[in-house]
Image (cartoon, rainbow, N blue to C red):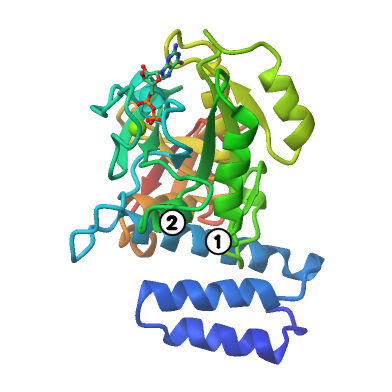
């Protein structure tokens, strides 16, 4: 343990150890991250705190709620992207096109009243896209803010055929007015001690009938702080590129598992934050597994085939892991 941890940090750490609920734990971990001296000697500890925060956030958002809260969308897959925007920009159409989810696409505004999730398949992983009721310049449906805060990525959708600039300003304004920080950075680079800090982007829909140049204009105004993507829910244009960037921003790795003596299961990878270790994988498989695990073997690029590794070994994208109890 590095010697120069401050009393504020140690107090936060004591709070973490004494915490009874996930919320208390999260709160304490965030304070630990905020107060830990940032230098080389604490890098490992910083990374560990980050991973703990991400693990608890995941667990919290996967858990079913006691009271039925229609605005709580349990997290599924490699990451959750919440689409936000003014009425009629095509939020529902995008979710329907990319995920096949049953959402209402209509010419009438305000057809969507509660968030609806769908799963989008991309390179062996599933990414969750969430359709939501519309926001306006001065109104955000009560409950929706909670959905947005819990998201990994916020995609602000505007319409290339309409007043895209005004729509972007309206959506950004109402969210920033609620103190959300919105910027396009990999989620691993967000400030883990600040729950308001969010990865976000602008999505310009209806490119098939929209005005050429809207994407460029928005890029000049908002880029590179907020990346801008042009898509069409009608033709599918631009979707692949947008989803590929979402996967990058989720800053995750795919890890396959195998049983000793059996071939690897190469279709359904676990997805873990970049920097995750064998122990983190074990935790993801089953919460009791880290305690039972003796060692692991790993196959992957740049590794000796089936090399034996310690639980602290950092995993890489597409590694295959065999855990021995
Ligand atoms: N031409 C075209 N029309 C679209 C596109 N996306 C949505 N629409 C139409 O725009 C209207 C509003 O779409 P909807 O998904 O309900 O918008 P929402 O209110 O943001 O969910 C519907 O009539 C859709 O058919 C698109 O990419 N191209
Ligand atoms: Mg809708």
Residue at image x 33%, y 22%?
107
Ligand 1 within 8 Å, label 1 CB: no
The residue depicted at 73 percent of the width and 21 percent of the height is: 216
Say which element carries label 2: helix
From the top left corner, tell me how far across and down residue 295 is, in percent. 44, 52
Mark 1–mark 2 contact, CB under 8 Å? yes
Q: Percent from the top left, x then y, of residue 8?
A: 67, 88
Query: Spatial distance from mark 1 to mark 2, Cα to Cα?
Result: 8 Å
Viewer-closest of 301 and 89: 89
Q: Vertically, is 14 above or below 129?
A: below
Q: Tell whether 206 sits left or right of 215.
A: left
Going from the N terminus, do you reach mark 1 or mark 2 first?
Answer: 2
In the image, what residue occupies the spot 62% across and 35% down?
A: 166
The dot on residue 145 is 2
The answer to whether residue 304 is visible is no
Circle 2 Cα neighbour tier, 10 Å, few/some/many (<14 / 14–19 / ≥20)? some
Residue at numbered disc 1: 178
Q: Residues within 10 Å of mark 1 (few under 14, many from 20)?
A: few
Q: Which disc, if any, is residue 132?
A: none
Ligand 2 occupies quarter? top left
Residue 92 % position (x, y):
36, 28
Image quadrant holding the C terminus, namely bottom left
């Amino acid at each position: 343990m590095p010697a120069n941890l401050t009393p504020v940090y140690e107090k936060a750490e004591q709070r973490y150890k004494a915490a009874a609920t996930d919320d208390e734990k999260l709160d304490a971990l965030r304070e630990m991250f905020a107060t830990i001296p940032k230098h080389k000697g604490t890098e490992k500890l910083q990374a560990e705190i980050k991973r703990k925060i991400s693990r608890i956030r995941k667990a919290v958002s996967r858990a079913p709620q006691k009271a039925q809260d229609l605005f709580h969308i349990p997290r599924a897959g490699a990451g959750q992207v919440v689409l936000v925007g003014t009425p009629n920009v095509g939020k529902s159409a995008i979710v329907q096109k990319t995920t096949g989810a049953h959402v209402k696409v209509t010419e009438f505004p305000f057809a969507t009243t509660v968030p609806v999730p769908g799963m989008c398949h991309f390179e062996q992983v599933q990414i969750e896209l969430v359709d939501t009721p519309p926001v306006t310049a001065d109104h955000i449906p009560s409950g929706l803010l909670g959905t947005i805060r819990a998201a990994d990525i916020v995609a602000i959708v505007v319409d290339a055929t309409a007043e895209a600039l005004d729509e972007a300003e309206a959506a950004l304004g109402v969210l920033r007015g609620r103190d959300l920080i919105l910027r396009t950075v990999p989620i691993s680079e967000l400030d883990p001690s600040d729950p308001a800090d969010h990865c976000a982007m602008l999505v310009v829909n209806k490119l098939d009938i929209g005005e050429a140049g809207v994407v460029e204009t928005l890029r000049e105004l908002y880029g590179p702080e907020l990346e801008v993507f042009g898509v069409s829910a009608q033709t599918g244009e631009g979707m692949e590129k947008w989803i590929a960037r979402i996967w990058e921003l989720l800053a995750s790795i795919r890890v396959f598992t195998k049983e000793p003596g059996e071939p690897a299961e190469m279709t359904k990878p676990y997805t873990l934050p970049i920097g995750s270790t064998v122990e983190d994988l074990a935790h993801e498989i089953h919460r009791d597994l880290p305690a039972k695990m003796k060692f692991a073997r790993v196959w992957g690029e740049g590794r000796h085939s089936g090399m034996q590794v310690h639980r602290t070994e950092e995993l890489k994208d597409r590694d295959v892991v065999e855990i021995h109890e």
